[in-house]
């Protein structure tokens, strides 16, 4: 009887050691951030005319349509990067090389006062989408896939660290980066709409 009691106690102790790879708070925060930033794009482009979608404040500026195409292509690329990172062996020893907290990362990516030249492959003129609708549908498809992943993943996101253009990030931060990047270009869309010459 004593052995049975000890065995039951050991099983109970082990069950407490099986923890979620990310906390409930982290999971909910990422899911909410992804949902909000998807809605942000949708709200900003809803009801716009062809002239409004293609308007450029300056010859070297992006139109709203080009912003959406860039968002869509980036979403696909970020998903592939994140998926590749979690499929690679865990490397928690690299966590010490991460230079930003989650909040600092979101603030840095969302800061439009710092201009960043994008990867040549993600320039609007090099992308496959024929129009805004096609680009947004692609974005939504990848975003839905990422949101489902966040809600149910058992991957140890904090223990898979990758090298990115902004430094070392763990896989959870790659998800936050994805949403923050969407927010960055939603702000850009809003800037285009605020231009005094924006078609009425």
Image (cartoon, rainbow, N blue to C red):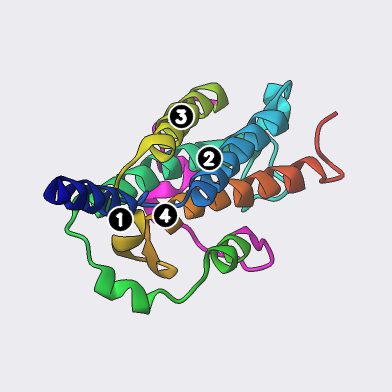
Gap between marks 3 and 4, in whole Å? 16 Å
Q: Is residue 143 above or below residue 96?
A: above
Q: CA distance from mark 4 to mark 2?
A: 11 Å
Q: Look at the numbered disc 2 and give the secondary structure of its residue.
A: helix
- Relative to 85, residue 28 above or below: above
Question: In the structure shown, which secondary structural element does the residue marked by tag 4 occupy?
Answer: helix
Residue appearing at x 84%, y 41% in the figure? 197
Residue drawn at (37%, 62%), measured in percent from left and top? 170
- Which is closer to the viewer, label 1 or label 4? 1
Residue 119: in magenta span: yes
Q: Extreme front residue here?
A: 1
Question: Which residue in the protein does label 4 denote?
Answer: 172
Residue under label 2: 31
From the viewer's perspective, is 134 left or right of 63?
left
In the picture, the disc for residue 144 is 3
Between 145 and 123, the one lying in front of the other is 145
Check disc 3 and report its element: helix, strand or loop.
Answer: helix
Which residue is more in the foreground, 186 or 125? 186
Count residues near mark 1 (Cα–Cα under 10 Å), then give few for <14, some for 14-19, many for 20+.
Answer: few
Marks 2 and 1, Cα distance to the nearest angstrom? 25 Å
| Quadrant position of the C terminus in the picture | top right
Decide which of tag 1 and tag 4 comes sooner along the chain.
Answer: 1
The magenta stretch spans which residues? 110-131
Q: Position of residue 86 (x, y in %)?
A: 26, 51
Mark earlier in primary sequence (2, 1): 1
């Amino acid at each position: 009887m004593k052995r049975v009691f000890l065995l039951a106690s050991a099983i109970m102790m082990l069950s407490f050691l099986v923890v979620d790879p990310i906390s409930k708070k982290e999971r909910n925060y990422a899911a909410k951030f992804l949902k909000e930033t998807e809605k942000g794009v949708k709200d900003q482009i809803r009801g716009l005319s062809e002239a409004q979608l293609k308007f450029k404040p300056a010859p070297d500026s992006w139109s709203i349509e080009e912003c959406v195409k860039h968002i869509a292509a980036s979403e696909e690329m970020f998903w592939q990067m994140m998926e590749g990172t979690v499929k690679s062996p865990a490397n928690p020893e690299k966590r010490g090389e991460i230079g930003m907290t989650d909040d600092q990362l979101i603030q840095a990516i969302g800061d439009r006062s710092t201009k960043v030249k994008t990867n040549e492959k993600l320039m609007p003129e090099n992308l496959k989408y024929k129009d805004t609708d096609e680009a947004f549908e692609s974005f939504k498809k990848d975003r839905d896939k990422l949101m489902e992943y966040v809600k149910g993943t058992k991957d140890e996101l904090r223990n898979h660290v990758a090298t990115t253009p902004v430094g070392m990030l763990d896989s959870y931060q790659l998800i936050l980066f994805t949403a923050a990047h969407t927010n960055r270009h939603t702000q850009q869309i809003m800037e285009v709409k605020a231009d005094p010459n924006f078609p009425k």
